[in-house]
Image (cartoon, rainbow, N blue to C red):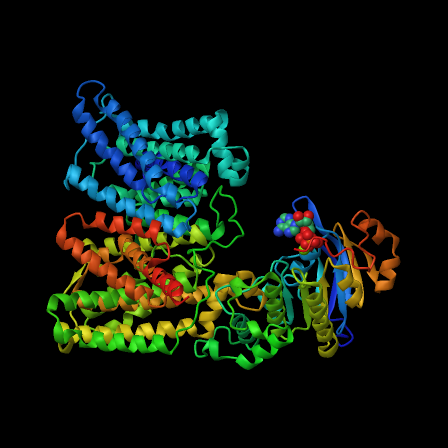
Amino acid sequence: MAAISAPVLRVTRLVKAFGGVDAVRDVSFTVDAGELVALIGPNGAGKTTCFNLLNGQMRPDAGTIELSGMRIDGLPARVIARRGVARTFQVAATFASMTVRENVQVALLARAGAQGSIALRAPAAFGAEADALLARVGMIKLGNEGCATLAYGDAKRVELAVAIAAAPRLLLMDEPTAGMSPRSRTRLMEVAASLAKKERIAALFTEHDMDMVFGFADRIIVLDRGQIIADGAPAEIRANAQVRAVYLGEEEPLSTDGTNTSKKMY
Amino acid sequence: MSTLSAGSLLAQLLTGLADASSLFVVAAGLTLIFGVTRIVNFAHGSLYMLGAYIAYSATHAFRGGVGFWGAVVVAALATGLFGAAIERLLLKRLYGAPELLQLMATFGVVLIVRDATLSLWGAEDLLGPRAPGLKGAIEVMGRAIPAYDFFLLALGPVVLLALWLVLARTRFGMLVRAATENRVVAGALGVDERALFTAVFALGATLAGLAGALQLPREPANLGMDLGIIAEAFVVTVVGGLGSIPGAFIAALVIGLTKALCVALGTVAIGSFEIAFPKLTLVAEFVVMAIVLSVRPQGFLGAPPAMAPTTAVPDQRRLIVPPGQRALLGAAIALLLAALLPLISDEYTLVLATDVLVFALFASSLQFLMGTGGMASFGHAAYFGLGAYAAAIAVKAGWPMLGALAASPVIALVGALVFGWFCVRLSGVYLAMLTLAFAQIVWSIVFQWNDVTGGSNGLVGVWPAAALAAKPAYYWFALGCAGLALVALGWLGQSAFGYSLRGTRDSPLRAEAIGIDVRATQWRAFAFAGAFAGFAGGLYAFSKGSIAPETLALPRSVDALVMVLLGGLNALAGPLLGAAAFTWLQDTLARATEYWRAGVGVVILVLAIAFPMGIGGAVHRLLATWRR
Ligand SMILES: Nc1ncnc2c1ncn2[C@@H]1O[C@H](COP(=O)(O)OP(=O)(O)OP(=O)(O)O)[C@@H](O)[C@H]1O
Ligand SMILES: [Mg+2]
């Protein structure tokens, strides 16, 4: 139908429970192209579970997920990846026996549909493209380093390069700046923001650092115990009483004076 | 076509249940040990065999009334003590090791126990006594059933009940349950793990010894008992769910009944087809296992497999560097030297060198599967054997040699595609056990299909074409073939496919998230590995001129594993080094002593404990420290 006007991501009444735990309850929201949206909430709110549902790693119990107007819920993760959904993981998932560059090269090979080719020599494929992506996330100098020995923040950067190597329509970043110094955080978020703006990617990220959330997000969705309790522009969220109540006792995280960056970072 | 009378069906069922019952007693020990220590104990069958031999000697030692029953008790306790000793001296050093190494190490124990038994009791089968008081038969619906079978029939439920009481009612049982369910909790309870592990191992070994001793009135003590029972016991534990004793009981029942049904059905004609069901008994349990695991990967009552990926090697996270120019130069020089070998060596050395080439290819194909693919196979000999038999059968059917040799990778590929489809659905120990099961199926078929495979005698007269008949000529031919195949395998590892495969090993999560189909990739790798192993098998058949079922039996699979681990799982030249070292070692030992298997066993143990990264890994480390 009106696929052109459809948002890149439309989530409708999504539900997921683990045994007795309702991790995601009746969640609905949209993300448009070029939008950088933050998904926040206390530990265990269901942010990562949302991501797992969106990229097909888990099947929702109920509800629908549409990518540019096409249903993707129920599809396997690899198929959803091919449709243009890329993600990073809360605990960085990289190929440990490969170098940083090779990680990105494999992602580029997969994007080109050549992941099963026995005619292409992997270390020689897409080298220049991989370097360009690494330069973008500030990892060019560590291109030949093994992924198993990287500092945590660097591994997260590699993941971002791997994710954007897929030229996604929808980019999901689970705590992309965890383990980084405040300066690197800002730089990484600038990269993410420019990706969304220049390449019209719909980007969704979770983050515990409220400076990053309020500094970069176009819109903020607040989850609490699996339910959305607020969805709006940063100014609206800051003024929202319910959000304040949820975060109360957690060192006033909604102030932007930088005193709250010591929150749980992993 | 036989008619199925109620009487014969009942008789078969009772025998089947008696078998199931003693199989359960063995499997209960195995699953108990796994539950607590997480070690899959290959040597469990050896403990069973020891029980039978000790009982044999003990009955002769104390004659008279208590004779047999006293001997059973002595055998069970002695085996239990022996088990505790193995645990104390050996396995406790391996608790932190990757499961593959543990499995290998316990196989080292198998080899040593086997040769020790050979030297103590000799190679002859030893006919045991009949159980006093249970010598007669009981008539059931016109069939005579041995009274002893009824005794065994009761044994399984009694052991199940006894174990249940111990686990449910005693402090020891509580600790065992805590350790089985959750290691962390057990640690927090202040369990002295070392004492618990030893006690559990002793208990498991006692059960194995008991079952072995009680088998004596039905079957003479013989050297084939160890591997004979272990394959079945593995199937029972895995089908029941690793760590679950009631699961093992159910699995033993299901398998016992399936076998009994096969025998009772006899040969059935369906249309123009004739199915000889009794012949299926050897494979029945493995078929049951394949079906159960593909529907329920954790077995009947097992806990769902943990999400953490199982690693086969300690250096799985190490950076792997593609071969540079120096490596290629080294390979070229090695090839040149290898080509010059026939000019300076005698025929004996050439035969040995041909073996090295064949096994280097075989081991490399396993390394591709295990190292690059992260899938540990305990039944890789199946594909080697399929290739060897394909070539031999084709030559016997009048095919030219090259055509027959070309058939070997093709047939092995087909086999690997079929079995691999099931295997890639599992991981870790379960995967290893399923590959083992499939290898046993192939072995059983080859062993029984007299008309085509020559049965236990195998096939003779599998000679190469006249031009390649001379030893140097065949050596050069094998060098060319194996060399090309190794280059192809090396290329495969460097290809986009090879990197994707390594990606699925390193992080299945990441691989799927960038659009790689993990299972399909692994399946393809399985097929490739099978095809290359099959090609090695074809080369092997022509180099020997004859093949027998041993070509694809379990020890051959373990040989390949030892070669790979000897060389180092991630070292590119590892399998070559490993194949050369292993072939040389085996030859030297076999010429020096009758007990060469024990020698190999010792090497395996030393390797597992002292050099978990293999020769290749050790050299790599040495070079790394030396460069600094
Ligand atoms: N695979 C799983 N099995 C069982 N429960 C799960 C699973 N994944 C998440 N949960 C539960 O679902 C709830 C939501 O977890 P989730 O990881 O989505 O939270 P989160 O918002 O990402 O938290 P954090 O900020 O700590 O990362 C938690 O109660 C968690 O324990
Ligand atoms: Mg999370």
Front residue (pair A198, B457): A198
Q: Is residue B549 above or below residue B253?
A: below
x and y percentages locating residue A230 in the rendered image? 83, 57
Quadrant assignment, res B619 = bottom left
Q: Is A224 above or below relative to B186? A: below
Give the x, y percent position of residue B240: 44, 42
Q: Which residue is drawn at 14% across and 66% down?
A: B349
Q: Position of residue A218 (x, y in %)?
A: 80, 68
Q: In which quarter of the image is residue B562?
A: bottom left
**Residue A242: in sight, yes or no?**
yes
Q: Name the quadrant of the C terminus of chain B.
A: bottom left
**Res. B267 in view:** no
* Residue at the bottom extreme of this rendering: A128
Which residue does the image show at 15% across and 74% down from the upper left? Answer: B342
Location of residue B99 in the rendering, given as x and y in whole percent from the top left corner: 41, 50
Which of the 4 image quadrants contains residue B522? bottom left
In the foreground, B19 or B333: B333
Q: Which of the four quarters of the rendered structure image does ligand 2 lie in?
A: bottom right
Q: Is residue A191 left or right of residue B592?
A: right
Position of residue B459 in the picture relative to residue B504 (left or right): left
> Which one is in front, B534 or B283?
B534
Decide if residue B61 is on the left or right side of residue B292.
left
